[in-house]
Image (cartoon, rainbow, N blue to C red):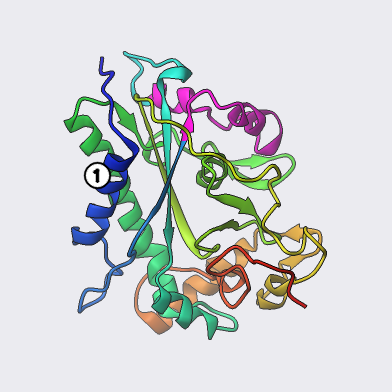
Amino acid sequence: MSHGKVSAAWIEGVIQDFLDHSPENSLGVEPQEKAWDRALVGFVAGEDKLYDLYKREAVGPFHWTPAEAFNLGFPDKPARPEELTVISYILPQREAIKADNRQADYFPAERWARARIFGEQANNALRRHLVAALAEVGIDAVAPMLLPQWSRQTSEKYGFASTWSERHSAYAAGHGTFGLCDALITKAGKAHRVGSVIARTRIPPTPRPYDHHRAYCLFFNGGKCKKCIDRCPVGAITEAGKDKCLAHLRPASNDYVKEHYGFDGYGCGLCQTGVPCESRIPLKVQD
């Protein structure tokens, strides 16, 4: 049973080295264009009480705690919560991808759709790479999203959900808070993908510089902005929140991407681009 130790800087280096050098970090088009340039990395203690809150209230009873997820991967050598650290990272969308999608008004730009499909394949490769790098130094780790037991679920309160939420772990890791359209607003904005790995090691948790899950959204702090409402092509966002708009993703955007861009994919992301929180935490209320 491994109880190795690594530093936060070592983990950040493993992640960035992959993004800098791996051919798997690609949008799937020639000449090769990277899906991601950099990452923001944070850490959560395995016993953090937020995971109990997610199970009781914020997501549903099906949502795993870190120990539950880790022990699915290592049933023969289970870990206690206090032995674990959740490594959470944000992959901000590259400027060229955001710029293209700002111009979109109904279906996603090609680069955005590629980031959704090929960029998430790169994210999965990064998950596997980080797990393997930890194993090489004697540390057991799992990527919850890659566990065969991971599944989509239905939350009584919130509808579409799953057994592990990357965004909720990112919130716990101090990365950011949720906006009106449910995207996570981070210091790199809300145009991003998220990933996590749970490791049997202890790394000091990242402070959460907020005390409310809506702290960074202009609408919930003064009632202004609402630009994501205007950007949504199908009216799925209102002042009451966001409908998951799944029908727009499939079949509508899926059909569009296949016909116009020549690959089997989908996406939208209009509410994540062309808004004040696209690439930053808004500093003041926008009129």
Residue 277 place in picture, x, y as percent? 61, 67
Identify the residue at image location x=48%, y=75%. Answer: 255
Residue 55 lies in the magenta stretch: yes
Identify the residue at image location x=26%, y=26%. Answer: 139
269 up-or-down from 144: above or below: below
Decide which of 109, 192 is in the foreground and name it.
Answer: 192
Residue 224 relative to residue 136: left or right: right
105 up-or-down from 278: above or below: below
Residue 243 place in picture, x, y as percent? 70, 59
Residue 42 relative to residue 189: left or right: left
Q: What residue would you read off at disc 1?
A: 129
Question: Quadrant of the rendered structure where residue 53 is?
Answer: top right
**Label 1 packing within 10 angstroms: few (<14), some (14-19), many (20+):** some
The kind of residue tagged 1 is His
Decide which of 256, 100 is in the foreground and name it.
Answer: 100
Q: How many marks?
A: 1
Point out the stretch of residues depicted in magenta: 44-72
SS of the residue at dot 1?
helix
Residue 265 lies in the magenta stretch: no
Which quadrant of the figure contains the N terminus?
A: top left
Which quadrant of the figure contains the C terminus?
A: bottom right
264 up-or-down from 202: above or below: below
Residue 127 relative to residue 187: left or right: left
Question: Quadrant of the rendered structure where residue 249 is?
Answer: bottom right
Residue 150 place in picture, x, y as percent? 46, 37
